[in-house]
Amino acid sequence: MSELRASETQTRISHLIFIVLLCKKILNRPIFVVMEEMYRNSDSQYDDMQRWFAYLRRHDANIFDVFFKDKENISDEDIVAIIEDVAKFFRLPVPVIQDKCETIAKIMISKEGTECELYYDWKLMEKAGINNVDTFRLSIVHELSHETLFQTRFLLFENELWIQELAADMVVGAFSAIGSDVATGKYKYVLRQLPASMTHPDGELRAAIVGYGREYITQLRKQGAIDVIQEVLKGLPAFVYGHYQELQESWNHVRWEDEQEDNPIETAPIDYESLPDTNLIKQSYLKYKASKEDEI
Ligand SMILES: [Zn+2]
């Protein structure tokens, strides 16, 4: 009886294998098709789907999106054209461009604010995740915002440098919503990796103000306001006061760490002999000492 069942099962399996092979031969395609492969058969539909996914993640990119998706080749000419374009947006003269920098990018402005040099390191930028036109453009917007705000003092917090950084990132957020919709996902990801320092606030807060800048300018536009950067920055105090405790705690911590670096705590060697006899560390120490004396 059981032999009969076994042969029946064998026959069924061979029938199934035959049907699968036949299907594969006739259709010349895998039996189990994933959605993406199905769309790939139709180039235009596949491209539409990819564009739709890129659109969905444009302001909220994860680590995988940042390093493997939406990358673009940017030539030296493209870089210059983007910088010129952003300078035009701020109505600033094109800065002197230096393609060597010890950090991702920085701007040096003369004391009088009349001369400006923009430094960047494209290799470091790519490594950090700044690997397409939108993200590079936003990085330049951040740097040139510093030039625009060179004379401005916000006096909202005891570290003015931090507020200048938040202001520049708020302008980045606003810029991304003016004219064409510039993707901010990768830019915010890069910011989130940066810890608070003496000169820059925590990257999470900087990423948050990019989103806030976008929302703020959208509200201004609904009220019919014109797209002027100074108008956008009227929203900065509300953000700073809304995150005041966070800023203060972070700043206290950065200062404390800075003081520790300057004055490292001297740790005195422990006097084991002075510990009570019941102390286990003292007991181990005495045991170790006795064994060493025995060796001698
Ligand atoms: Zn900055």
Image (cartoon, rainbow, N blue to C red):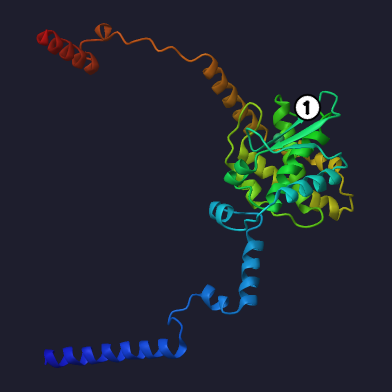
Q: Residue at x 40, y 13 (%)?
A: 267
| Left or right: 29 as drawn, with respect to 39 | left
In the rendered view of the protein, which quadrant contains the N terminus? bottom left
Say above or below: 5 vs 109: below
Q: For residue 48, what is the image quadrant?
A: bottom right
Q: Residue at x 59, y 37 (%)?
A: 194
Q: What amino acid is labelled 1 in the image?
A: Leu
Say above or below: 281 vs 151: above
Q: Residues within 10 Å of mark 1 (few under 14, many from 20)?
A: few
User: Which residue, given by chain and number where applicable, does mark 1 sit on?
Assistant: 155
Ligand 1 quadrant in view: top right
Q: Position of residue 37 (x, y in %)?
A: 52, 75
Q: Position of residue 135 (x, y in %)?
A: 68, 49
Say above or below: 275 vs 246: above
Q: Position of residue 28 (x, y in %)?
A: 45, 85
Q: SS for tag 1? A: loop
Evaluate whether residue 171 shows in this view: yes
Toward the viewer: 204 or 237? 204
Evaluate whether residue 240 shows in this view: no
Toward the viewer: 80 or 259? 80
Q: Residue at x 70, y 25 (%)?
A: 159
Q: Position of residue 171 (x, y in %)?
A: 77, 43
